[in-house]
Image: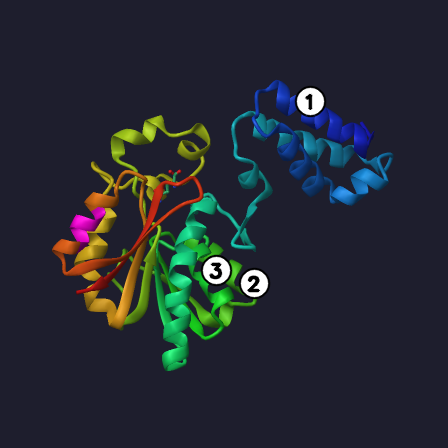
Amino acid sequence: MASTLAELLRKARGQLAEAGIVDAALDARLLVEHFSGTTRTQAISQPDWMIDPATVAAVEAALARRIAGEPVHRILGFREFYGLRLSLSTETLEPRPDTETLVEAVLPLVRRAAQGKGSCRILDLGTGTGAIALALLSAAPQAEATGVDISADALATAERNGADLGLGGRFRALKSDWFEKISGRYDAIVSNPPYIAGKEIAALQKEVRDFDPRRALDGGADGLDAYRIIAANAAAHLEKDGIVAVEIGSTQKEDVTALFERTGFIVLEAMRDLAGNDRVLVFSPV
Ligand code: GLN
């Protein structure tokens, strides 16, 4: 059935609220705007704008997915990260605002390296959508990045995001199991690796557990497997004065620090996210 824009928005909000969706009003607006091709301004200035039946049906299908628990950005197929619009796929972790902390921690170091030598090479391990690498490239015009992932589908998504953002010329996607296919040295090795302990996965929010790829979450029995690999191999792939920056779970600061100290690194910087949780560690070789 056809509907006015105002009526469609009102119904969408009502359905999501009734289903107990926390951000019902916001999610309703995002889904209606995206699937009807309308804007927020239009909803205010042209509430009687007619939406045709096929479009109403598309919005209703999107609402049903949200009510079934799918995160709103998975339904939209994209999410903003560090001001960049990134496409998602089922093989990519949904980029989180917390991870912008890592970008902010690394950016001054990347800029300094770029100014000093006229370039800066970044290696992003487990790049997913390419979020971290592309955010750094967008803010550091002299940098170049290699995004590594074990998922070909994730790499295709990262590559597409790079091209869509006009950063493709400085971004290379490489299929590799961590460092396996990496040769050469980098000024910054960055990663938001899987860091959830295996037994804690079942207790994650449904939206994370059922929709983020398991491979991007599962850090092995104690959640630290990826850090062991990075700590053991990073030094061999770092330029002089290079750094390693990793996102961590909020309770992992001491364990991850100990792992890196054992392989010859010291903590350069520890940062918390906006919620005040330990979130990022930056290391340099001793
Ligand atoms: N931050 C994610 C979460 O807890 C986990 C991402 C990861 O393992 N790197 O939802």
Question: Can you identify the residue that label 3 sits on?
Answer: 135
Question: Can you identify the residue that label 1 sits on?
Answer: 14
Whether residue 11 sits left or right of residue 119 in the image: it is right
Question: Can you identify the residue that label 2 sits on?
Answer: 165
Residue type at tag 3 = Ala
Mark 2 vs mark 1: which is more N-terminal? Answer: 1
43 above or below 60? below
Residue type at tag 2 = Leu
Is 15 magenta? The answer is no
Q: Ligand 1 falls in which quarter?
A: top left
Whether residue 85 sits left or right of residue 197 in the image: it is right
Residue type at tag 1 = Gly
Residue 163: mark: none
User: Distance of mark 2 from mark 3, alpha carbons?
Assistant: 10 Å
| Residue that sits furthest to the bottom in the current view | 117
Q: Could you tell me which secondary element the residue under label 2 belongs to?
A: loop
Q: Residue at x 52, y 32 (%)?
A: 70
- Bin the neighbour count of mark 3 within 10 Å (Cα to Cα): few under 14, some 14-19, many 20 and up: many
Is 259 magenta? The answer is yes
243 above or below 225? below
Q: x, y (%) of residue 5?
A: 80, 34
The range drawn in magenta is: 256-260
Q: Residue at x 19, y 44 (%)?
A: 255
Q: Nearer the viewer, mark 2 or mark 3?
A: 3
Question: Do residues under tags 2 and 1 come within 8 Å of each other at their CB atoms?
Answer: no
218 above or below 112? above
Q: Nearer the viewer, residue 43 or 34?
A: 43
| Residue that sits furthest to the left in the current view | 262
Q: Could you tell me which secondary element the residue under label 3 belongs to?
A: helix
Tally the marks. 3
Q: Is residue 153 visible?
A: no
Whether residue 80 sits left or right of residue 276 in the image: it is right
